Image (cartoon, rainbow, N blue to C red):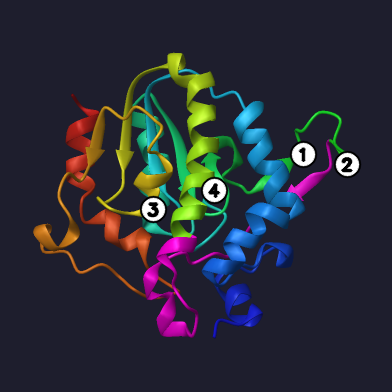
Amino acid sequence: MITLEDARRLNPQLNTELFFPGPSDVLRALEENRIVREWLEFIENEHEAREAEVLLFVPCTPKKPYDPPRDEFHRRLLELERNFDVYLVSVSEPLALEPREFWNFRWARGMKGVEGEGEEVNLVYDAPFFPWIEKYGYEWSDEIAERVWKKLAAVAGKWFERNAEKFERVVCLAFPDTGYRKILSRVKVDAFVPEKRPEELGIEVKEDYFQNTDSDYLLVWDELLKVLRV
């Protein structure tokens, strides 16, 4: 099993209220965790993105915060901002979307009229939401996963409805059949990177708690750059 000590070793700034090591923990958080619920309401109803040529959705990764970067993946993403007119948004279980300005994982609670409005909240969470979590003693459930993705897709869809006109193109960096793409099922994406599954590209996806998505997506970085240069 993944312990709180493991999670703190991965993310020393972890908010212990946001430790969700198993799929059922993530589903329960969507329904019961105060911070998660208020964040999802904020993203769905209030958050306003800045205008940019490209809205770029990217996967969440294990090490948080993302800014300053703690891995090569986020170092490169932040570098993209200097070379392209992009607005970066991470796709996440359980937070649905993590807009670029919150990549320090600090949120002055924006929900109007909510008790504690303006209070800074630490959003550093731990939620390894992948089938390989069974290696660590947790049961993976497709039924639970679909319920989680459906709830988060509704939030992401509402966010996109409010912000879509601010962007000329929408690009998503996520392998086919991943939860990231399912969360974006209600978003009109113009280009997905990559178009092929990892096995079709000869990529062996990392299935490890301490290192997974960040290194996998570096292997398709050149394809992403080609799409952004169009």
Residue 60: x %, y % from top left: 45, 53
User: In what element is the residue under mark 3?
Assistant: helix
Which one is closest to the eye, mark 1 or mark 3?
Answer: 3
User: In what element is the residue under mark 4?
Assistant: loop
Q: Identify the residue at horizontal 37%, vertical 75% (top origin).
A: 132
Residue 195: x %, y % from top left: 17, 44
Mark 3, other Cα within 10 Å: few <14 / some 14–19 / many ≥20: many
Tag 1 residue: 109
Which of marks 3 and 2 precedes in the sequence? Answer: 2
Measured along the vertical axis of the image, is residue 200 above or below residue 50? below
Magenta segment boundaries in residue numbering: 118-144
Which one is closest to the eye, mark 4 or mark 3?
Answer: 3
Tag 2 residue: 116
Examine the image and state in which quarter residue 58 appears: top left
Residue 133: x %, y % from top left: 43, 75
User: In what element is the residue under mark 2?
Assistant: loop
Quarter holding the C terminus is top left
Tell me which amino acid carries mark 1. Arg
Which one is closest to the eye, mark 1 or mark 4?
Answer: 1
Tag 4 residue: 67
| Alpha carbon separation for disc pair 1 and 3 | 27 Å
| Alpha carbon separation for disc pair 1 and 4 | 19 Å
Q: Identify the residue at horizontal 37%, vertical 59% (top origin).
A: 214
Which of marks 4 and 2 precedes in the sequence? Answer: 4
Image side of residue 84 versus residue 18, left or right:
left
Tell me which amino acid carries mark 4. Asp
